[in-house]
């Protein structure tokens, strides 16, 4: 089992920045990719950013150039730096971990953290 604990959500004005953190513990040797999904009210959960064990990254088109995913292997922690935030970025953000590289199949979820961007 893998446990994921998120932190860093909150309320920010449009154009501002936030950084989300996700600390992993447990059987992390089985994990090959970690990342972030988000779900806005009335919408499906969508994949925002992924980082693999070796550091390869991938982003949703809607956040490219604004969000950066990174990881600290010594701390087993993944970060999502979100800049130039827009009201449409408002959502619950979920940390995710999986055995498959693309993270389209998620094996473990965090509890979610609310990000609200005001206009």
Image (spheres, rainbow, N blue to C red):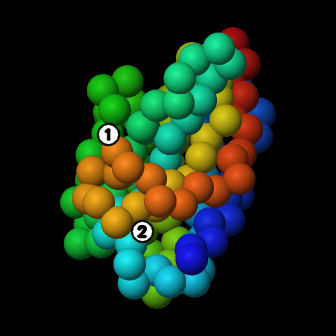
Q: Position of residue 43 (x, y in %)?
A: 57, 17
Q: Where is mark 1, residue-wise?
A: 59
Q: Nearer the viewer, residue 16 or 24?
A: 24
Secondary element under disc 1, as helix, strand or loop, is strand
Q: Residue at x 65, y 14 (%)?
A: 42
> What residue is at 38 percent from the left and 78 percent from the top?
30
The residue lying toward the viewer, choosing from 49 and 87, is 49
SS at mark 2 in the image: strand
Relative to the observer, which residue lies in front, 106 or 119? Answer: 106
Q: Are marks 2 and 1 in contact (CB under 8 Å)?
A: no
Q: Quadrant of the C terminus?
A: top right
Q: Is residue 15 at all visible to an observer of this figure?
A: no
CA neighbours of label 2 inside 10 A, class few (<14), some (14 to 19), many (20+): many
From the viewer's perspective, is residue 31 above or below residue 58? below
Point 34% across, 32% down: residue: 60
Q: Position of residue 16 (x, y in %)?
A: 61, 32
Residue 11 coordinates in the image, percent (x, y)? 77, 33
Which residue position holds label 2? 71
Find the distance from the CA under tag 2 to the CA under tag 1. 15 Å
Seen in the image, is 112 located left or right of residue 103?
right
Q: For the point 55% across and 35% down, which residue is it? A: 38
Residue 119's tag is none
The location of residue 106, given as percent across then percent down, is 44, 53
Nearer to us in this view, 95 or 74: 95
Say whether residue 91 is left or right of residue 70: right
In which quadrant of the rendered image does the N terminus lie?
bottom right
Can you see residue 61? yes
Q: Earlier in the sequence, mark 2 or mark 1?
A: 1
Q: Quadrant of residue 51?
A: bottom left
| Mark 1 Cα shell of 10 Å, populated few (<14), some (14-19), many (≥20) | some
């Amino acid at each position: 089992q893998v446990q994921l604990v998120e932190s860093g959500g909150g309320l920010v004005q449009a154009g501002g920045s936030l950084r989300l953190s996700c600390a992993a513990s447990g059987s992390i040797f089985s994990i090959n990719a970690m990342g972030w999904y988000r779900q806005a009210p009335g919408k499906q959960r969508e994949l925002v950013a992924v980082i693999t064990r070796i550091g390869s990254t991938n982003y949703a088109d809607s956040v490219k150039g604004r969000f950066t995913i990174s990881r600290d292997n010594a701390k087993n922690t993944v970060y999502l730096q979100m800049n130039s935030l827009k009201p449409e970025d408002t959502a619950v953000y979920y940390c995710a971990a999986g055995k498959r590289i693309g993270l389209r199949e998620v094996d473990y979820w965090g509890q979610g953290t609310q990000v609200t961007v005001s206009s």
